[in-house]
Amino acid sequence: MDLEKLLKTLGYNKSQMFKKNGDLSVKGSRNYNKLMKLLSDITVLTGISTENIIREIENICNEKY
């Protein structure tokens, strides 16, 4: 699954998440922060680090969009 499919699964779509120049939109930034908070909460609840997942999502966003 790629980031775009993941976002769609969570109810977001690319046109809402990114500006035409590839930067995150205001809504995209809010939703991105929600995703990061969710991953952080998973770490707190399970004791399993999601640091690698967060880093990979950040890398994907920086490369692709």
Image (spheres, helix red, strand yellow):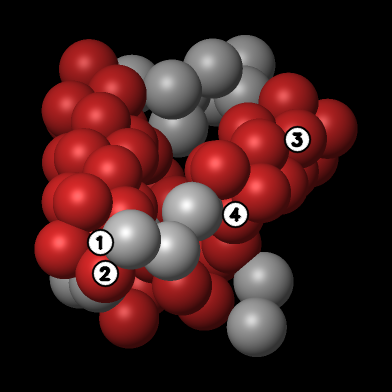
First in sequence: mark 4 vs mark 2 = 2
Identify the element where label 2 is drawn. helix
Amino acid tagged 1: Ile
The CA distance from mark 3 to mark 2 is: 24 Å
First in sequence: mark 1 vs mark 3 = 1
- Where does label 4 land, which residue? 53
Q: Position of residue 52 (x, y in %)?
A: 66, 49
Q: Position of residue 40 (x, y in %)?
A: 28, 44
Nearer the camera: disc 3 or disc 2: 2
Residue furthest front as drawn: 47
- Where does label 2 land, which residue? 46
Nearer the camera: disc 4 or disc 3: 4
- For the C terminus, the image quarter is top right
- Where does label 3 land, which residue? 59
Nearer the camera: disc 4 or disc 2: 2
> Mark 2–mark 1 contact, CB under 8 Å?
yes
Residue 53 in sight in this render: yes
What label does residue 42 carry, if any? Answer: 1
